[in-house]
Image (cartoon, helix red, strand yellow):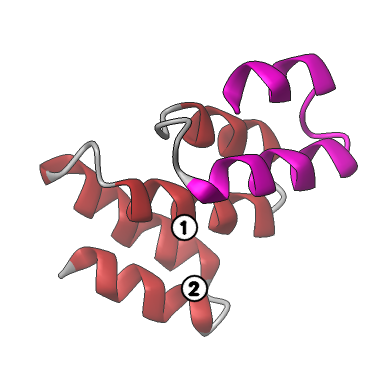
Amino acid sequence: LFAAWGLALERLQRFDEAVNAFDHCLASEPSNAEALYHQGLSLHALGMHHEAVEVIGALPSADAGVGELASHLVRHDALDPHDATSIT
């Protein structure tokens, strides 16, 4: 329920509220890869790049979006390229 709410808020570009919804989702489902990924995107959209890096670090490396998000953060100087390779 909270993951779906977070996705809806993210689509509306209400990123601070989306992060909060994903927090609620992850409190009961800490390994929910979709919630982690979208929380990372929302944090990045808010300019909270280091927090986004922490979130994507919790994602399983097999998740298809991890490399894409890590590359995006490197391009925006939010993530050291060496750290990006250790995440993906």
Please report the bounds of the magenta region as a residue range: 64-88
**Which residue is depicted at the point 15% across and 70% down?**
1
**Which residue is depicted at the point 35% across and 68% down?**
6
Residue 40 picture location, percent across and down: 53, 47
Q: Which label sits on residue 38?
A: 1
The answer to which quarter of the image holds residue 87 is top right
Going by the image, does 14 lie left or right of 29?
A: right
SS for dot 1: helix
Residue extending farthest bottom:
12
Q: What is the three-letter code of the residue carrying label 2?
A: Glu
The tag earlier along the polypeptide, 2 or 1, is 2
- Is residue 2 in view? yes
Going by the image, does 50 lie left or right of 56?
A: right
Whether 80 is among the magenta residues is yes
Q: Which label sits on residue 56?
A: none
Q: What is the three-letter code of the residue carrying label 1?
A: His
The answer to which quarter of the image holds residue 59 is top left
Quick one: label 2, few (<14), some, or many (20+) residues within 10 Å? Answer: many
Residue 30 picture location, percent across and down: 21, 37
- Quickly name the residue at label 2: 10
**Which residue is depicted at the point 77% across and 28% down?**
79
**Numbered label tally:** 2
Whether 82 is among the magenta residues is yes
